[in-house]
Amino acid sequence: MSGAATAGAAPAGREGRVFARAAERRRGERKAELDRLAAREDCLPELQYFLSLYAEDPTLESIGGRTGLRPAAILCLQAPVELFWAQGFSPVKIYSGAYASANLTSPRLPALMCPCVKAILGEMELDPGLALAPWAIPLTCDWLVKFGEARGLFGGFSGPVHLVEVPRVKEDPRARARWLSEIRSLSGFLKDAGGRPLKRADLLAAVRRMEEARRALASLTLLRREGLVPAVWYSLITGAFFLDAPGRWTGGVDGYVSALRRSGGKGGEGAARGRRRADAAEGPGRDGAEGGRGQGAGGDGGAGAREGGAGEGSGRGLPAGMGPGGGPGAGEAAGGAVPPEAPRPDGVYLTGAPVYFPNFKVLHLMEEAGLKCLGDDLCSSERLFPRHVEVSDSSAEGLLAALAEAYHRGCLCPVFSESERRAALIREAADQAPVRGVVFHLLKGCHPYELDSFALEGKVTGWGLKFLKIETDYSTEDTRNLLTRLEAFRPTLGV
Amino acid sequence: MLLKGYRLAIQHVMFIVLMYGGRFGVNLGPAVPCFACPYVTGCGGYCYLMGLQGYIGFGISLGHFWGFEGLRALGYLLLFAGLVMLLGKAWCGFACPFGLISDWITLARRRLGIPEAKIPPAALRRLGAVKYALLGFCAAGPILVNLGVLHRDFYIPFCQMLCPGKPLLPLFAGETRHFALDLTNAATLVITASSLAVTGACLAAMIARPRFFCTFCPMLALIHLLKPITPLALRKNPALCHGCGTCQRVCGMDVERVCTEKASADVQTGDCVNCGDCVAGCAADGALSLQFAGRTVVSSSAGLALGLRKPRP
Ligand code: SF4
Ligand code: SF4
Ligand code: SF4
Ligand code: SF4
Ligand code: SF4
């Protein structure tokens, strides 16, 4: 699918001026966001590392220089990053939240095309080096299936491109077998693109390195549930994952986590534990619905106590499982003795389409509206990579199978044929933290997420959570509107 | 990882108790719900499968079913049921010496990076039915001996002919005698030849797959039949499961339902040996748990799977 080798030629004349303006605006957007973040009171020194990664406006070349490996571009999360490292590549997920980038390509694309995709195409226009790299494109939503064609409108690719066909039926064993063969062929592509042949030892080392990154992110996520990590910082950190070597990124996250703990971090997993145990004890099937969870305010506040876990769970007449946490062991994850927790702030959970730097509009507006985001299932942040890849069979085949499964079967992207399990992460967060409502972030033109939102709304409201769907794009025109809606949402949470 | 480490430690302690306990005066009795094999000199308890065959065989042949022998058989049955109520299938996951040997082989294979042989889950489920047939054989064999259909030398036929524990477990007490053919008569030759053939095949399969023999083990079938009175169970909260497949992939028994179940909390299948590996590997908070009478013994979490915290309810 390699396109015409026109990429790299700098446009001249009127087009050149348009490009220059777009590049200038894009720089402005990035700088404005970075300045805004740096000026925040909660900008700890440990965050400077992440801010600096963005500040240098990284290119594939500069990332390659940092990691010491040849960069390869990926879109979406289904391409296992471990495979790239094992074969001598530095995988870089190409994304952009810059309005200027989306706007640059917009006139030549369908009006209702996802701004994420427009922005990536815009980034490719502004940085001709992008088209020279090897690309692995998982074919997830329709816009990405047609990504190569869309790019063809702008000069195509100059480097090798590999389309990774993602089976949409996850639960089918035949689809899983197909997916494994896709992963093998991705490995073959990487080798043909100049990478090392796949070796067990390299793959095992990559899996271990990645587990360190996962462990660091899991620690950060636990603190997030405690209300200690604002969504903007969490998103900035996850967005930086592809900008540096994974070891340094992991060190950066560990440093920030330690700093948060020092500055009053209150432990980890004790939160609402009693509630969770009660759920596991009952399980769905008891009532044929969703684990016998109480419906509505006060429905099942004392569930933890039912299991002998009195005082461990919720139990203050809040919506089920959403009381202040702090059971025994709170703080164990934080690695130290922790004083009894104060009641934690009530918050919301963010779901839906990804949020990419520098467009943290929704995150800022939620904050402004007084909503504390205690978790999300965005593929740009908490769902950036599979939470854990448990390896039992550590042969090369076994490792490949484990990776394939984790990146496909465990993926909760809405493009799959069924989204029944998509609410699992929301339910989990609501058990861990005082989540009272769900904000569904929809990007105009994203049909899979839009369709998902309806079923999800039914599910989460059934659990007694409030639900708000906001539809937006990368522009700032709707800022006032969104803020008003988010502010109106807050009182419905009973805060 | 942590949970697996605890399990391995417990397995080793139980291995010492059940294999060598008798030498130190420790004996868990005649109705142990795992392969504590009386063929091992100085073992610390007796596998109930041998007892079961013996009581049926001798009970019928001696006509003592309604007398003292019958009462004793009933007592042993109750003892067995009591032990099952105490630990359920954790006897398999945490105590069985043969299970640990199987796990050793698997650990060695994994360390060497040798891939695991795959059997489609549906085929495995069908194969799993064989354990009930073997349990039937444990009961029917001695009766056939008494009816004169089988030679008297087949008095505990499952142990003699089919159980790989008979030759393998005594090896750890330095006894190799069950690796020889017994040429006393045709029956003993058939018995020993069959035992060696089955053991060889099992060993090869155990190298290829974890816990291979457990799929066919009549003890597992017997414990599973007592499921309604067993307090220990693997439970799932499907609302918290995102379907990643880890639990099934790490399960030595390849239990599919633990992953695919979307409605019921009961994922304690006939093949599950309550090893807890799925709980240890699942990174969804509270999705899987081992419970005793409804109380959580340990539950899954990202922290546990990633080694951030110690296992706890
Ligand atoms: S947000 Fe939706 S439309 Fe856009 S790339 Fe993702 S799945 Fe596709
Ligand atoms: S031979 Fe097997 S079934 Fe018989 S007692 Fe020994 S371990 Fe149990
Ligand atoms: S199923 Fe396995 S672990 Fe359980 S008794 Fe049989 S051999 Fe031992
Ligand atoms: S490992 Fe946990 S989350 Fe994954 S499929 Fe199994 S139960 Fe579900
Ligand atoms: S289902 Fe879980 S507990 Fe049961 S055998 Fe498999 S891994 Fe072990």
Image: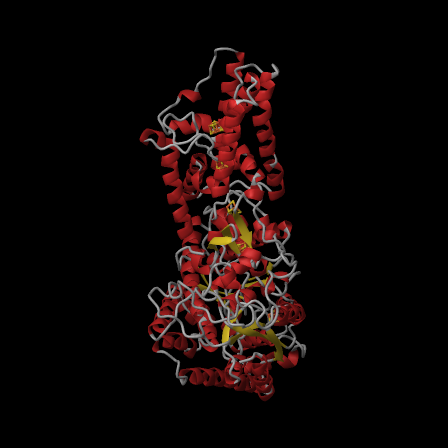
Residue A108 showing in the rendered view: yes
* Residue B18 x/y as whole percent: 39, 34
Q: Quick one: which residue is furthest to the left in this view?
A: B24
**Is the residue A162 above or below the residue A18 in the image?**
above
* Residue B16 x/y as whole percent: 36, 35
Q: Give residue A205's quadrant in the image.
A: bottom left
Identified at 43% across, 52% down, the residue is: A204
* Residue A396 x/y as whole percent: 47, 47
Q: In front here: A194 or B10?
A: B10
**Is the residue A299 above or below the residue B120 in the image?**
below
Q: Could you tell me which quadrant the C terminus of chain B lies in?
A: bottom left
* Residue A309 x/y as whole percent: 46, 61
**Is the residue B242 above or below the residue A465 in the image?**
above
Residue A76 showing in the rendered view: no
Q: In front here: A59 or A337?
A: A337
Q: Is residue B228 left or right of residue A313?
A: right
Q: In front here: A145 or A417?
A: A417
